[in-house]
Image (spheres, grey):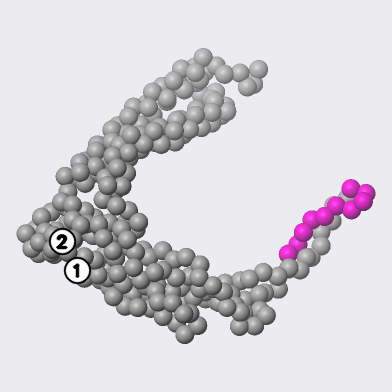
Amino acid sequence: MDNEVTKREIYVSTIIICIILIIGKLIVDSIVSSATEKAFELETAVQVYDDETFAYIKSVNAGTFLAEGSLISNEIITLPELSGQYSKIKKVKEEYTRHTRTVTKTNEKGETYTEEETYYEWDHVKTEEFVTQSFSFLNQRFTAKELKYSIPTDYEKTIYKSSDIRYCYYTAPVVVNGTIIGNADEKCFKETEFLKNKTIESVIKCAEKRIDNAPIIFWIIWCALITGLVVLFIKFENDWLNK
């Protein structure tokens, strides 16, 4: 029987599984070690909630810190067509464009044929972004280059200039709450990252959960990979095993 699994294929498959499991164990140990180290670093970090303490840890090179507060845009971004004030505006121009495509259809006799179909849709033309270049956080200034934070935007409104031209606007507020993770060294803040809508407590808990969750996710993916490799191996004609 052509599709019959031989004893030698089972033997080789077992070896493959064992080798990949050993490799997986080494990888997951590294993942857990890294996650544990990161969690410990955050658990023992200096926690900051006010302007005075934030300035102080900078002056004494306090090391790793977690600071909770409001991130405020130093430049107010506005456009004439919008009434609000923002830290970022994304303006997307779209054009209602005619397209054609070839579709396959079936007639009453069950025969297939193709024909050209016309349809319209809004196509992207260009995107303009207007964004602040610096922030204030607990009375300390950060430039956009110094602070790792990709400002997310939410849909604001759509303005139609004509029947086939429209502008979609996406904006971000001037003030957003969250936590900065960073390192106070050499009288300045380094390696800073802002986590939107995160408290110090939630950041630490998330790091602790990662110790347990990361290995589970890894083993699910790894076992799926092992299964796929073994199935592919068995599907091949492994005549060389019988030589």
Q: Is residue 88 above or below residue 59?
A: below
Instruction: First in sequence, mark 2 or 1: give its number.
Output: 2
Kind of residue at disc 1: Gln
Residues at badges 2 and 1 in contact (C-beta under 8 Å)? Answer: yes
Q: Secondary structure at mark 1?
A: strand
Between residue 19 and residue 216, name the one nearer to us.
Answer: 216
Say how many tags the image has. 2
* Nearer to us in this view, 232 or 146: 146
Q: Secondary structure at mark 2?
A: helix
Considering every residue shown, the one lying at the far top of the view is: 7
Task: Verify whether residue 141 appears in magenta.
Answer: no
Quarter of the figure with residue 161: bottom right
Residue bearing mark 1? 140
Q: Residue at x 79, y 56 (%)?
A: 104
In this view of the protein, which residue sits in the foreground, 69 or 110? 69
Q: Which residue is mark 2?
A: 54
Question: Which image quarter is the N terminus in?
Answer: top right
**Looking at the picture, which amino acid does disc 2 mark?**
Phe
Q: Where is residue 128 drawn, in percent x and y?
A: 46, 77
Q: Residue 42: horizontal and vertical position, in percent?
A: 21, 46
Q: Looking at the picture, how far across and down is residue 147, in whole percent?
A: 26, 64
Instruction: Rate crowding at label 2 as few (under 14), some (14 to 19) or many (20 or more) other CA atoms within 10 Å.
Output: many
For residue 104: magenta? yes
Q: Magenta segment range? A: 101-110
Along the horizontal axis of the image, is 56 left or right of 153?
left
The residue lying at 77 percent from left, 59 percent from top is 103
